[in-house]
Image (tube, rainbow, N blue to C red):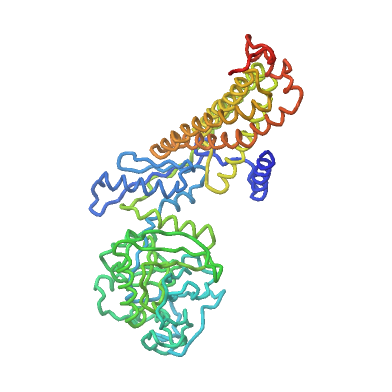
């Protein structure tokens, strides 16, 4: 067991070296950070309901503190919400909490150029260029031309090549994870040309797939090529007046029950979109992963409730429509992040967003979608940097208190247990190493940030760890007091009895920590987490170091013969203990 423990310590140390993580990440009170105050905006301008505020607090808390141990604080202050995030700059925090993160799926009704061309520049393209049915190809890597749409296919590997110069969300495309029907053989996408496409056919060969249109750029008629059928007059006016270069619509409230006019993320294309067919509240799960075929990072979605039927209905409607209405746009926080072509009705209630994501951006989008949409729209009324000066002084005081407590435990162990005290000191040292490595690695991989409540929990754990050693040592001495067992035998018999007591005590402590962690928030939850972590480390140290090390020391004459400095001599164990040979045997 000693070798196994050594291997664990070395492995954790190696992980720290590989990730260049040598010190813990600190929380808001120790490292400073940013505090953002959000002021709610309601459609009627009145005060928000407490239910909607409570729901917003819970969603934001989960979003900024998804792992539950990163020490972010979210609280109500009147009708406002105050978010304090440790160790983060203003831009990072604003980006984290400033988006509604509600994904809406809407059918595309019209597409246009995001901005008019510069004065004097003549358009050389036809108003409504569309590809011929025989055109094939995929998006060119490295191309800086805007890609207004990509394709949706039932197979995760049937995705278009991403544009390496666009943003990840702007290159995202959605596809189903369900099994395709026998006729689903359409190609992902095609480069635009000048002929009008034929209506997509599920039984067509790959080269006959429908492809997105190129937005019109005619300077004299911004409505060229736009079919107004089914579009609200007000939406047409907004579409005609919209200039994405001046107003990209980031953060806009797109009411799900109304048609929406918005821009692509890069501002190159503007859209008229139908009422939301599927909203973010219908998303059941969202997770990031890697496509096993292409090696791309992607975000996988599954729908709940009416979501699967709604998703199937909108993809069927789009499939049976002519371009550009054969596209379904994904709108996130008022911005169209993608408008893929639907090549086949998709059933099954699952979809995926893929593109040139990396692990960070895929995890970020998945977490935003997973934790739901905010029930209110917020504006940032204030953003402040938080200093760590006061927390640093408190940390210094906490470390001094911990060092004093540890020193007192060591002194007591050496005076009372003498030679056995060396075992308790080394066990505490091993527990300290494991605790430090755990805190550092949790900070590197799980977002754990060490705050003052965590420090308090770690200091309290010194006594918990010492209790386990005392229970074992006293059991050994009880067995030796009987006078009929050798030290080796006493160690084994005492361990059988002591480990049950140790496990029960640690189990009670761990259950209390778990209950406190889930019922509390903020600093109290941080204290509970630290206490639960050190309880598990205590069990590992006692089983993998203390017991094997004591068994190894029993082979030494210093302990086996009961030297007066070993802590196992008759005088130290009991004043009435006599030599083993004079103690009568029990019948």
Residue 114 visible within the image: no
- The answer to which quarter of the image holds residue 430 is top right
At x 56% / y 44%, what residue is drawn? 443
Q: Residue at x 72, y 22 (%)?
A: 559
The residue positioned farthest toward the right in the image shown: 557
Q: Is residue 3 left or right of residue 245?
A: right
Q: Is residue 461 left or right of residue 236?
A: right
425 or 136: nearer the viewer = 425
Left or right placement of residue 182 versus residue 163 in this view: left
**Whether residue 279 can be seen here:** yes
Residue at 40% in and 72% down: 339
x, y (%) of residue 480? Answer: 64, 20
Query: Image quadrant of residue 76?
Result: top left
Q: Where residue 158 sits: x, y (%)?
A: 49, 76
Quadrant where the N terminus is found in the figure: top right
Farthest residue in the front direction?
A: 587
Q: Position of residue 228 (x, y in %)?
A: 27, 79
Nearer-the-camera pick, 173 or 295: 295
For residue 326, above or below residue 4: below
Residue 496 point in image, percent of width and height: 57, 31
Q: Nearer the viewer, residue 384 or 524?
A: 524
Q: How many marks?
A: 0
Q: Quadrant of the C terminus?
A: top right
Q: Is residue 144 above or below residue 25?
A: below
For the residue pair 3 and 575, the one nearer the viewer reads as 575
């Amino acid at each position: 067991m000693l070798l196994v423990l050594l291997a664990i310590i070395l492995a954790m140390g190696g992980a720290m070296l590989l990730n260049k993580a040598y010190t813990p990440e600190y929380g808001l009170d120790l490292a400073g950070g940013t505090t953002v105050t959000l002021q709610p905006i309601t459609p009627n301008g009145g005060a928000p309901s407490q239910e909607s505020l409570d729901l917003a607090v819970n969603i934001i808390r989960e979003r900024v503190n998804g792992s539950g141990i990163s020490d972010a604080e979210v609280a109500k202050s009147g009708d406002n919400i105050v978010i304090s995030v440790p160790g983060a700059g203003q831009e990072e925090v604003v980006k984290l909490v400033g988006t509604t993160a509600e994904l809406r799926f809407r059918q595309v009704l019209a597409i246009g150029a995001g901005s008019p061309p510069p004065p004097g520049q003549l358009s050389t393209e036809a108003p409504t260029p569309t590809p011929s049915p025989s055109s094939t190809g995929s998006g060119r890597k490295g191309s800086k031309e805007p890609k207004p749409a990509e394709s949706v296919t039932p197979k995760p590997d049937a995705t278009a090549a991403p544009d390496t110069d666009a943003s990840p969300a702007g290159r995202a495309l959605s596809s189903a994870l369900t099994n395709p029907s026998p006729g689903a053989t359409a190609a992902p996408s095609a480069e635009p040309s000048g002929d009008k496409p034929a209506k997509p056919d599920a039984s067509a060969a790959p080269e006959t797939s429908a492809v997105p249109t190129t937005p019109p750029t005619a300077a004299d008629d911004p409505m060229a090529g736009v079919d107004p059928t089914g579009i609200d007059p007000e939406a047409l006016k907004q579409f005609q007046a919209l200039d994405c270069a001046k107003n990209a619509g980031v953060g806009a409230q797109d009411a799900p029950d109304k048609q929406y006019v918005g821009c692509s993320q890069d501002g190159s294309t503007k859209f008229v979109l139908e009422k939301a067919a599927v909203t973010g509240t219908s998303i059941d799960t969202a997770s990031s992963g890697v496509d096993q075929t292409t090696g791309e990072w992607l975000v996988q979605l599954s729908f709940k409730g009416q979501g699967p039927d709604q998703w199937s209905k909108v993809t069927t409607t789009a499939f049976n429509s002519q371009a550009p209405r054969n596209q379904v746009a994904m709108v996130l926080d008022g911005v169209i992040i993608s408008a893929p072509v639907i090549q086949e009705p998709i059933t099954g209630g699952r979809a995926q967003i893929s593109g040139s994501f990396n692990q960070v951006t895929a995890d970020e989008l998945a977490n935003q979608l997973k934790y739901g949409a905010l029930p209110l729209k917020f504006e940032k009324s204030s953003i402040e940097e938080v200093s760590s000066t006061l927390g640093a002084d408190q940390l210094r005081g906490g470390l001094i208190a911990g060092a004093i407590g540890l020193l007192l435990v060591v002194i007591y162990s050496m005076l009372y247990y003498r030679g056995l005290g060396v075992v308790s000191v080394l066990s505490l040292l091993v527990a300290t190493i494991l605790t430090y490595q755990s805190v550092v690695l949790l900070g590197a991989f799980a977002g754990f940030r060490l705050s003052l409540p965590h420090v308090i929990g770690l200091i309290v754990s010194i006594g918990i760890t010492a209790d386990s050693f005392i229970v074992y040592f006293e059991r050994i001495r009880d067995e030796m007091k009987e006078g009929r067992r050798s030290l080796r035998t006493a160690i084994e018999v005492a361990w059988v009895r002591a480990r049950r007591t140790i496990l029960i005590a640690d189990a009670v402590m761990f259950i209390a920590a778990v209950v406190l962690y889930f019922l509390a928030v903020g600093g109290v939850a941080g204290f509970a987490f630290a206490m639960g972590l050190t309880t598990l480390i205590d069990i590992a140290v006692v089983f993998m170091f203390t017991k094997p090390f004591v068994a190894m020391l029993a082979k030494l004459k210093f302990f086996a013969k009961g030297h007066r400095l070993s802590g196992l001599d008759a005088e130290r164990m009991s004043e009435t203990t006599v030599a083993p040979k004079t103690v009568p045997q029990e019948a």
